[in-house]
Amino acid sequence: EANFARALLVILCRLAFFAALGVTAGSLFSMPVASFVSICTLLMIQISGYIQSIAGQDALLHAHRHSPASAPAFWDHFFSAVFKAFNAVVGPLQGFDPLELLTTGQLVTWGMLGSVFVVQGVVYGGALMAISAWVLNKRELALPS
């Protein structure tokens, strides 16, 4: 029962992050654009493993060249830096799947729960909360004419 409760708390932390993402997108954009931005962000989080493998490669466009001994071009360095930066931002959100651990009978530890809470709830959720609070503070909502 305790393992199941910890897995549910991990899922609750993820839902809190998703709610913060939706509120921030809703405060920045209109409803259709906010939905699109939220879905795209969630898809990017899901494919962060693939992005991590791309970021680990030395030359991304090297396969399209005819001579394999040629030096990496500017675009190789540029895209490698972009993928590494994207991986640094989105990588911690990937985490582990608590439902997979439950189905295989493995333990969801308090350390796992704490790390998910700190990363997704406090750091990323707090940053999204600060952005949306700042935007809503700058907007002039419901002022009399």
Image (tube, rainbow, N blue to C red):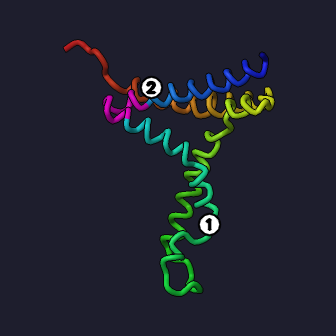
Dot 1 alpha-carbon crowd within 10 angstroms: few under 14, some 14 to 19, many 20 or more: few
Q: Nearer the viewer, residue 134 or 44?
A: 44
Image quadrant where residue 96 sits = top right
Residue 28, placed above or below residue 56: above
Task: Please identify the quadrant where the C terminus is shown.
Answer: top left
The answer to whether residue 135 is left or right of residue 113 is left
CA gap, disc 2 to disc 1? Answer: 36 Å
Q: Which region shows up in magenta?
A: 25-35
Query: Given the image, on which type of amino acid does mark 2 rest?
Result: Val
Mark 2 lies on a secondary structure that is helix
Residue hosting label 2: 23
Point 40% across, 24% down: residue: 136
Percent of width and height locating residue 76 = 52, 70
The residue positioned farthest toward the left in the image shown = 145
Q: Which labelled disc corresponds to residue 57?
A: 1
Query: Given the image, on which type of amino acid does mark 1 rest?
Result: Gln
| Front: mark 2 or 1 | 1
Image quadrant where residue 2 sits = top right
Percent of width and height locating residue 131 = 48, 31
Mark 1 lies on a secondary structure that is loop
The answer to whether residue 67 is left or right of residue 135 is right
Point 67% across, 30% down: residue: 99
Q: Is residue 133 magenta?
A: no
Task: Please identify the quadrant where the N terminus is shown.
Answer: top right
Percent of width and height locating residue 28 = 37, 32
Percent of width and height locating residue 58 = 62, 70
Point 58% across, 54% down: residue: 50
Residue 132, placed above or below residue 74: above
Name the dominant secondary structure of the magenta segment: helix
